[in-house]
Image: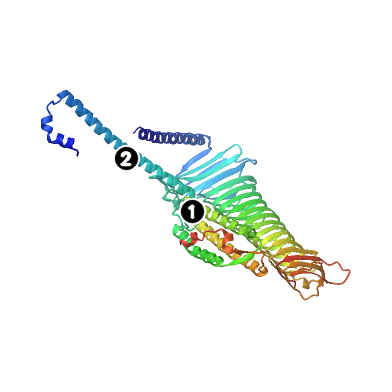
Amino acid sequence: MDNIQKYLQEHKSSLDTDIPDEENWARLSHTFSEMGRARKLRGRRLIRLGIAAAFLLAAAGFVLWKVNGTGNRQMPSPPTSVSSSGAVPTAPTTTQAEVVNSVYTPVILRELTGLGKTSFYGHNRGDFKIFSQQWKVLEVNEKTIEQHMRSVGPNGRLIQQLTDNYKLKIRLLQQFSVEINKVKNYLPPADTLVKIPSLSLLNIKTSDYEKE
Amino acid sequence: MKRNNVLWQFCFVLVFLSTAFQRAAAADNAAAASDNAAAAGDNRKIAENRDSTFILPIRQADHITVRTSNINLTIRRWADPKAQLVVTAAPADWDGDLLVSMRSGADGIIVEMGPKPRSRNGVVRLSDTWRSIKATLDIPDGHEFVLNTAFANVDILSDFMMGNFTVNNGELTAANIPQLELNTQFAKVHLNDCHTGDITVNNGELTASSIPQLKLNVQFAKVHLKDCHQASITANNTTLTIGTVDILQLGSMFSNIDLTTVNQLKLTSNNDAIEITDLGEATGRKTFGSFRIGKLRKGFSLVGQNADVSIREIAATLENLKVEDQFAQLHIPIDGIPGFSLHFEGMFATVKSGLPRKPAGNRNELNHTEFTMDKGAAGGKWPVISLSCNNCEVDLE
């Protein structure tokens, strides 16, 4: 508080010599109350805007989740909004899909770890491109099955398809290992050949399977 | 302050527009439903624990179109020139309404069946109890038939002249359809005695007895066929088993293929395990994987890359055999046939054979092998065998 303010506070009563009349008091009082109401309104508007923004963000998040699916390999729960009986005799639950995931994921990780330790010498990395392309095809199919499970609920047929897709993935890794070993066995190392780490040919993110 | 107001007003306008559009759409749907109801021959809401019968006269040229969702259907034949649909609704705690419509359209008879689930607090749920509803359609033989099913099992016991089936998440059994077009996803299909089939199977199963003329496109599936005369098959990530095929054009990837007898094969294969018990003749290309043949009768020509080839027995009727491959194991037991004329060439190759070799070619490179071998009386008409394989292990015994 500066000196002028201090002086005014201390000599307030002596300075109030000209008191405004009733009309002026009423006008001033009205002005003050209007200012208070405006402040309150502004606060309410800000709260409403915040709520609207939160809704919009939530909606955008939901849309992104629906479009992209889940990032990790855990089975998404089917939404409660739509489910179907399907035409299959059994009515398995999402838990079975999770069991399928938990059974096959460590096997895939084991195969990938084995491949990670294998290197070989070869002429051309492109010869093995088909294996990484096939892996992508299997990933897309897995997502299709999961998407289907989300929209109609898991049933025996979809669980079987998911299981078969995992088996295909494991078979692909085993086939790849066989082909790599074939090349290793039949091709003697030479200076013109390049050392190729097996796993680098597959273009697979092993971290996806390490999460489990 | 002004900017906040504008934002708030914009949000309000968005909400208002969205509500207005929803109301307009609802009004359109209501109008469409009312139009459909007006156009329909018989359009009913079925109550539980009740049988409902729909009957319409049918002309010889009429097509039958059936769309069923969640309602199992059996299609039977009868002699009367009319179509009869009976819907049997067992006692059940339905959470909604069952809508059934049977009407005569410009092309023929259209049947539509499916539940309209009730929404509860915005949650739409089709409970298992919908499966307690069954329908039977009786129609005379010989019509063209279009079927579209989802989450339903359909048994076709009637004979159709032509069928166009789409099956999604369900089972289909059909027989005696001369011309069939079938598209399935997540479905199981059993077919008997179809003459011509144009079939696409995605993520499902197909079992068929005999389809003389077959065009099959299949992926992520299990397919078992008894026999075909002529087949063109594209199989990806599939287990395919066929009994007998006269002429087969096969394009496959990452599949397991097991064929009992094939007379003529044209092959494009990528990383498959192929096994043929009895093969007449084959030509084609193959990369990776294996190709195992029980008995080879006439001819074989293959360009391979990392493709193992194994033949258990070669018949004396063999006319020619040619393999170009690399990084592979070849087992071609030519020692067992009465006569042949062979030429082999390859880098880093090991060849196992008890017969004498004659050096051939003029490449004096280290690790290059080239030789010829002959067996059988001179002047005889013996098969010509040409093998070229780099980085291979070849067993000719």
Q: Disc 2 designates what residue?
A: A47
Q: Judge whether B99 appears above or below B302 on screen.
A: above
Residue B68 visible, this angle: yes
Q: Disc 1 designates what residue?
A: A149
Q: Residues within 10 Å of mark 2 (few under 14, many from 20)?
A: few
**Can you name the residue that lies furthest to the left here?**
A14
Nearest the eye: B290 or B140: B290
Q: Quadrant of the C terminus of chain B?
A: bottom right
Nearest the eye: A155 or A20: A20
Q: Name the quadrant containing residue B232.
A: bottom right
Chain ID of residue with mark 1: A
Question: How far apart are the alpha carbons under marks 1 and 2?
Answer: 39 Å
**Can you name the residue that lies furthest to the right here?**
B379
- Whichever of callouts 1 and 2 sits on the residue coming sooner in the sequence is 2
Q: Name the quadrant containing residue A58.
A: top left
Q: Is residue A25 left or right of residue B16?
A: left
Q: Residues within 10 Å of mark 1 (few under 14, many from 20)?
A: many
The kind of residue on which mark 2 rests is Ile
Nearest the eye: B254 or A151: B254
Q: Whole-percent x and y of residue B366? A: 75, 70
Q: Residue B72: which disc?
A: none
Q: Whole-percent x and y of residue A94? A: 45, 57
The kind of residue on which mark 1 rests is Met
Q: Is residue B268 left or right of residue B78?
A: right
Q: Whole-percent x and y of residue B359? A: 81, 71
Q: Judge whether A22 appears above or below B343 on screen.
A: above
Residue A93 visible, this angle: no
